[in-house]
Image: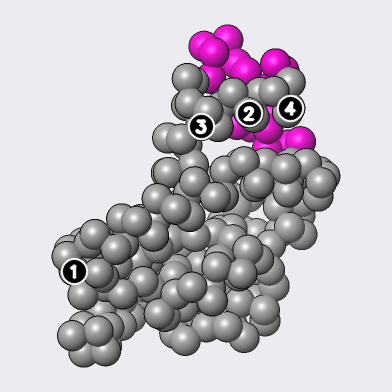
Amino acid sequence: MAARVGLTGGIGGGKTTVADAFAALGVTVLDADVIARRISEPGTAQFERIVEQFGAGIVDEQGRLDRAQLGRIVFASKPQRELLESILHPPIRAEMHDRAARDAGRYCILDIPLLVESGQYREMERVLVVSCSRDVRVRRLRRRGMKPAEIERVMRTQASERQRRAVADDVIDNNGDPADIEPQVRRLHDTYIELFG
């Protein structure tokens, strides 16, 4: 069984860049968002439950979930967000832990955006937070085309930088150049190999 390193950070903080850097070193990365998309494809039990709870208006012309529309609904309403999480989180969590248990590496990365908010950080052998200031994150998200109100809605649903850092065992700073990520990841990789060897 591979040790579980929970990776998290706020939207726009560069968590995917960090996960990719670990993957480039041969580390297994289990991405909660990727699993969420797969288990909510048409024909799955989760897809049926989501449509049943949120209505046919969240299905696009191709018969798939209109994720943008669903996002607008859940980020505007805590009860709706919690309803969606109650449908998706248990099977995502089960799959991630099952795959980590079968992984042959010394450790694997569990990329979980809501690691702190969901309390799942308590299930990890190590918690790694990608730290980035709010201003930098907002600038990055604006460049991606997100509107200020949309950014604010999403950020309001996420843990604060202080809350994430409070449970972190390790922190990667991503306020600077993307090239600064790789050496930080390499140092942590060496640390984890030693810790979990």
Q: In this figure, which residue is indicated by the disc labeled 2? A: 49
For label 2, the SS is helix
Q: Where's residue 174, x and y in %?
A: 47, 73
Q: Amino acid at mark 4?
A: Phe
- State the SS at label 3: loop
Could you tell whether 12 is left or right of 197 in the image?
right
Per the model, the C-alpha gap separating discs 1 and 2 is 35 Å
Q: Measured along the vertical axis of the image, is residue 12 above or below residue 68?
A: below
* Cα separation between marks 3 and 2: 9 Å
Mark 1 Cα-neighbour bin, 10 Å: few <14, some 14–19, many ≥20: some
Circles 4, 2 touching at the beta carbon (< 8 Å)? no
Using the image, determine if residue 160 lies above or below residue 46.
below
> Is residue 127 shown to the viewer in this render?
yes
Picture coordinates of residue 140, whole percent (x, y): 56, 56
Task: Look at the image and give the residue range highlighted in magenta.
Answer: 56-73
Q: Quadrant of residue 1?
A: bottom left
Residue 54, numbered circle: 4
- Depth-wise, is mark 3 or mark 2 nearer the camera? 2
- Percent from the top left, x then y, of residue 74? 74, 41
Estimate how packed mark 4 is, as few (under 14), some (14 to 19) or many (20 or more) residues with alpha carbons within 10 Å. Answer: some
Label whose residue precedes the other's in the sequence (4 or 2): 2
Look at the numbered discs 4 and 3 and tell me whether their residues touch, using CB distance below 8 Å.
Answer: no
Which image quadrant: the C terminus? bottom left
- In the image, what residue type sits under mark 3? Ser
Identify whether 182 is placed above or below 170: above
The quadrant holding residue 179 is bottom left
Q: Is residue 174 visible?
A: no
> 47 or 130: nearer the eye?
47
Q: Are marks 3 and 2 in contact (CB under 8 Å)?
A: no
State left or right for residue 11 relative to residue 82. Answer: left
In the image, residue 85 sits, relative to residue 17, either above or below, namely: above
